[in-house]
């Protein structure tokens, strides 16, 4: 699913402009999601972008934005607290409701997960929440300030070093997180909940996931993010989280996206391929049909569609089958079924006795053809000759010219 990403600005709950990135699928979205980033992070954290991309590839429109005083958003971070983050989430939900649809899914990373759990009761359209490495109580972040608590209590504010960056924190932040009891909110959640957490998370321990999960009522699910760190710095971990959330949420927020009506105008004999801002997933529109191409997770993809070489094999197989059917029907032969198994590999040219190329590697495609029906040996032999005469087979064996032209965006 190709995506459109646009920068948006909307008023926060306390008068400052908040800046976000709105991801839209190419077609009509099945639902909207709102993403809350981690404490002192921003919407541009790579994991946030990758998870958002995985969701939009499933047809979900996603808004990721900077809380007040962080990233590109206005305001002073030292004047914010956990309660103001919740208010910002509600303001973002109102923006989505006005411009597309209210968010059916809330996704929160770390303290953003705790904020999502607390904000859900103020967002009526929300039916599902996914937390990633979230603390069971916002007061958990107090340990990050442990070296500055005495100064905060004495002077009312202090400069703290978080993730290697200095931030000014005021005493009111400390007082605010101490007043929130997240477990009461979780028990009264009334929404589907997915808890994702790594046993190796050294920032927010796995025991937090246990407390969230035990406090919540069904429907609830837990997914372990084995070997992942708190910030999901490994791209494969972030993509996995995105694909899991998208698959889980589809049970509550809707199914496959509708194709954009303009895509159906691509005529036969032409194709349009659209890729998103990250990842390998692409929409393929041809002859009024919408297909998907991707790479398997082992190659850095999200496995939401066949790879380009798999599509090539499918094209050759389909063309071969169609050619056999057309020939058998013209001859009125009793061909009842066709099955073609194909495999592609790169092999050393020196291993191919009949190949002209003698150095380097060549592409090796093998077709296994099964013909069912009361065909005699002569008919089967003839059909095997015809199998190598399909147009795609001939194209792969002939000289091909490909030209590329850059057009204006």
Image: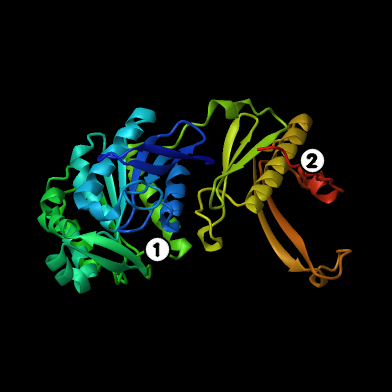
- Asked if residue 282 can be seen in this view, the reply is yes
Q: Secondary structure at mark 1?
A: loop
Q: Label for residue 391?
A: 2
- Asked if 66 appears above or below 259 in the picture, the reply is below
Determine the CA span between mark 2 and mark 1: 47 Å
Asked which quadrant contains residue 195, the reply is bottom left
Q: Secondary structure at mark 2?
A: helix
Would you say 49 lies left or right of 33 here? right
**Near-viewer residue (224 or 179):** 179
- Percent of width and height locating residue 108: 30, 52
- Percent of width and height locating residue 248: 34, 48
Q: Which image quadrant: the C terminus?
A: top right
Residue identified by numbered label 1: 232
Residue drawn at x 45%, y 65% as measured from the top left: 234
Asked which quadrant contains residue 344, the reply is bottom right
- Asked if 381 appears above or below 301 in the picture, the reply is above
- Percent of width and height locating residue 180: 12, 53
- Asked if 96 appears above or below 73 in the picture, the reply is above
Would you say 311 lies left or right of 357 here? left
Residue drawn at x 72%, y 57% as measured from the top left: 366
Residue drawn at x 54%, y 26% as measured from the top left: 261
Residue drawn at x 68%, y 44% as measured from the top left: 315
């Amino acid at each position: 699913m190709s995506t459109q990403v646009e920068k948006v600005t909307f008023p926060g709950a306390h008068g400052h402009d908040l800046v976000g990135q709105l991801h839209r699928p190419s077609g009509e979205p099945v639902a909207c999601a709102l993403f809350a980033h981690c404490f002192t992070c921003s919407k541009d954290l790579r994991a946030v972008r990758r998870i958002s991309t995985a969701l939009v590839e499933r047809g979900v429109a996603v808004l990721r934005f900077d809380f007040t005083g962080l990233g590109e958003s206005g305001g002073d971070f030292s004047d914010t607290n956990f309660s103001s983050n919740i208010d910002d989430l509600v303001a973002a939900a109102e923006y989505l409701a006005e411009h597309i649809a209210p968010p059916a899914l809330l996704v929160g990373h770390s303290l953003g997960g705790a904020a999502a759990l607390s904000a859900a009761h103020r967002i009526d359209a929300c039916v599902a929440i996914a937390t990633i490495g979230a603390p069971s109580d916002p007061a958990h972040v107090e340990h990050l300030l442990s070296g500055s608590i005495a100064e905060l209590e004495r002077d009312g504010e202090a400069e703290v070093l978080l993730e290697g960056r200095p931030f000014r924190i005021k005493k009111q932040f400390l007082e605010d997180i101490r007043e929130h009891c997240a477990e009461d909110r979780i028990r009264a959640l009334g929404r589907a909940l997915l808890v994702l957490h790594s046993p190796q998370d050294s920032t927010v321990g796995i025991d937090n996931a246990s407390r969230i999960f035990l406090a919540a009522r069904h429907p609830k699910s837990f997914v372990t993010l084995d070997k992942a760190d708190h910030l999901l710095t490994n791209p494969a971990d972030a993509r996995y989280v995105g694909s899991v959330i998208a698959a889980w949420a589809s049970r509550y927020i809707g199914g496959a996206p509708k194709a954009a009506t303009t895509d159906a105008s691509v005529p036969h004999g032409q194709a349009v391929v659209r890729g998103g801002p990250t990842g390998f997933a692409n929409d393929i529109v041809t002859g009024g049909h919408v297909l998907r191409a991707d790479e398997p997770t082992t190659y850095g993809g999200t496995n939401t569609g066949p790879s380009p070489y798999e599509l090539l094999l499918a094209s050759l197989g389909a063309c071969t089958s169609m050619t056999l059917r057309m020939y058998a029907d013209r001859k009125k032969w009793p061909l009842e079924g066709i099955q073609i198994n194909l495999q592609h590999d790169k092999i050393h040219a020196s291993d191919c006795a009949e190949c002209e190329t003698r150095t380097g590697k060549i592409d090796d495609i093998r077709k296994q053809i099964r013909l069912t029906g009361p065909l005699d040996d002569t008919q089967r032999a003839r059909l095997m000759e015809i199998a190598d005469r399909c147009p795609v087979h001939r194209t792969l064996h002939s000289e091909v010219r490909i030209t590329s032209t850059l057009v204006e965006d």
